[in-house]
Image (spheres, coloured by chain):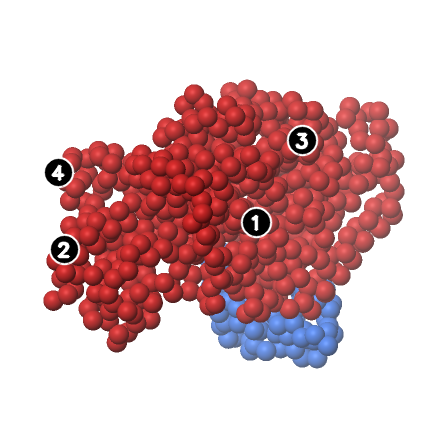
Chain colours: A blue, B red
Amino acid sequence: MAKITLKVPKGAVSMQEGKLVEWFVNDGDPVSLGQAIYAIETEKTTMEIECPFEGTFKRLGEVGETYKVGYPIAEIEQ
Amino acid sequence: MSNQALPNALPQDIALLIYTTMVRIHACDQRIQQLLAAGALQFQYYPCGGQEAIPASIAPHLHKEDQVVTTYRGVHDIVAKGTPMVEIIAEMMGKITGTSKGKGGAMHLSDPDAGLMVTTGIVGAGMPIANGLALAAKLKGTGRVVVVNFGDGASNIGAFNESVNMAALWDLPIVFLCQNNAYAEYTSFEGSTKSANIADRAAGYGMAGETVDGTDPDAMHAAAGRAITRARNGEGPTLLECMALRLQGHSFGSEEGHMDQEKLAAARANPPIAKFRASLIERGNATAEDLDTIDADAKQEVEDAVEKSMAADMPNESELYTDIFADASAVPYSSPTTTAAEPDLSDREVVTVPMVVAITEALDIALGEDPDVFLIGEDIADPAGGVAKATAGLSTKHGVDRVRPSPISEQAIIGAAIGASLNGMKPVAEIMINDFSMVCMDQIANHAAKLRYMSGGRTSVPIVIRTVTAGNVGNFAAQHSQSLEAWFTHIPGIKVVAPSTAADAKGLLLAAIADPDPVLVLEPMRCYFVPDEVPVGRYEIPLGKAAVRREGTDVTLISYGWCSVEANAAADALAEVGVSAEVIDLRSLVPLDLDTCVTSVKKTGRCVIAHAAVEFSGFGAELAAKLSEELYGQLKAPIKRVGARYTPVPFTPSLESMHFPNAARIKDTAESLMK
Ligand SMILES: Cc1ncc(C[n+]2csc(CCOP(=O)(O)OP(=O)(O)O)c2C)c(N)n1
């Protein structure tokens, strides 16, 4: 079983941090490639993040919190 | 519509091959961006969307042995050249299973097995090196063709001018493939040049040029065929400009506000892959189901590569210092250091000749022994035989193919040497004067020095760069007299030697030519024309071995290059006042013989380091710091440096003599330590 960490992505070259605004999947949900998993708000825009792997989802971040780029925000267990 | 309706219509098998490559590129490019977008990966990525058809249409013309050089925006070129998908993805993830063991990364993939020789992150810098690959192909008669990719922006950089001129002059088997995606970062094509297009410039260089729609595989394949056939037939290079609008910002996540929104929207609505797909169905080359299968296979190939790469390891600590040099013991301060033994020349006949003649002899020996050795540089052929006559007679004896006079193009000279060395040759490049190496610093420091590491040891650059340090020969002034060794010793991956005797100049040069890594040889003009004793025949002075010129007990004088002459004179003068000086001539700065220095300074307790280079931030600062660390508490006086003063080299003799170190200053400094 591989565990893949999803970090706050650098969605724009100048992006430093983002605010987790909504989860689209619950802890323990099966997720599939391309599925929207959460939304993150930056200075410029709100991005919906697509799931990059199939597996079981685990939330690590909290809605409403602001995280730096690179912060581990979720995990996918395969 | 039948195939006949299209003037350049591709045969069905080629068309499907191109389509397959395009979707494989697209699947790879999209998957990487998806992983970046989700935060599963994080690095600078330069997408190739819109440009997929260019390399996909070239690929059917290329043999496996043909070679490609590309840029940071090169994943399409790399997939098309045949590098395994799993190695591409693993390299981008920094994994040991990547093309370059993760040491190169997304901007520096290389896969010589597939003919992918260099991926550079320096705009325009691939062109000089590609010329060298092509030069080797021509000299060795391999029939190989080289394709070098670069952007429209890169067409405005100096390396472009030097490279296309040299390639045209020498009829090199190369295609200069300009991927004109209408932007260079945030600057439009029109904002970068008054040229209406890039291909028209070819005429000015006396070479073929053509502009083609890089989104149209039929046209693209035909144009590439013309260029590659020309190169293969020995008819010289082509500047092929392929028009293909960039379908996204410069790098992943970067803004698009500077792009023409209408054109962008139109191009995105009908991207090259969709257009070609529709065309293939329309001409009856494939059904939608056939193409769906190709699409699905490509996705699966990428998925398998991602899965394998995620599971692979990153390189561990054992990889940190490997692939800098062929042998990690050449890394400064590595332990243990291994150096070949000094040759026993006691039985050799000795002739009295100046250093320049000893250098010529070394070159003559190397040319005579090894057909892969060749010389390249400005004015090096007869009758000139080099501005300082270091290559006199050699072109007459070995021919101008191997003693190759070049245009005044330092970047192209070093690039040609690098590229030829990647193909197994042993080039010796001459940069007339050390000061001029600053105009080709990128080729030396970013490429010659780093390709071994960036490729995870899969490529290497066994070149020699000979250059004269002309200080203290009278009135060469600020731009022809500098000793810039510290610029080079600061860059991991390049060896630096600085002889002071004719015998060492010969033996170090032969060792440098035999060495598997790039070596810069700094030849002191001050010693060039002074008669000196030189053993006849071949011998090598090992790199990384200092010479103790005289033994002493009170103070150690460490020097190299022409300043060693001053150090020897200072030791004579010190003897007269009762001070016994030990004199060390380093001969080689990288690798560095620290042991000899430590042993000596431990014995004497005092040390003066003298060099012709400016003292501030000079090599002596490094050595002094290291010796102080090694010998803390054992020194009788602080370690002193005597270098050139912090001024540009003055022209007038009254000031020049104050600028450079000399025996008197070295002696005074050493004497001051005795108090
Ligand atoms: C010598 C150098 N200068 C600047 C840069 C920064 N830079 C990276 S890509 C780029 C634009 C190059 O544009 P172009 O040659 O058209 O290629 P494209 O990125 O469009 O493929 C610049 C300026 C660099 N990498 N190297």
Q: Secondary structure at mark 3?
A: loop
- Mark 4 and 1 residues: CB-CB less than 8 Å, in contact? no
CA gap, disc 2 and disc 3: 63 Å
Instruction: Say few, some or many: other residues with alpha carbon within 10 Å of mark 3 (under 14 / 14 to 19 / 20 or more).
Output: few
Residue at mark 1:
B460
Horizontal side of residue B423 vs B301, given as left or right: left
Please provide percent x and percent y for residue B377.
45, 32
Please provide percent x and percent y for residue B124.
51, 39
Residue at mark 3:
B141
Q: Earlier in the sequence, mark 3 or mark 1?
A: 3
Which mark is on residue B576? 2
Is label 4 or label 2 in front? 2
Is label 2 or label 3 in front? 2
The residue at label 4 has a CB less than 8 Å from ligand 1 = no
Label 3 resides on the chain identified as B
Please provide percent x and percent y for residue B44.
54, 55
Quarter of the image where one finds residue B465: top left
**Mark 4 belongs to which amino acid?**
Ser
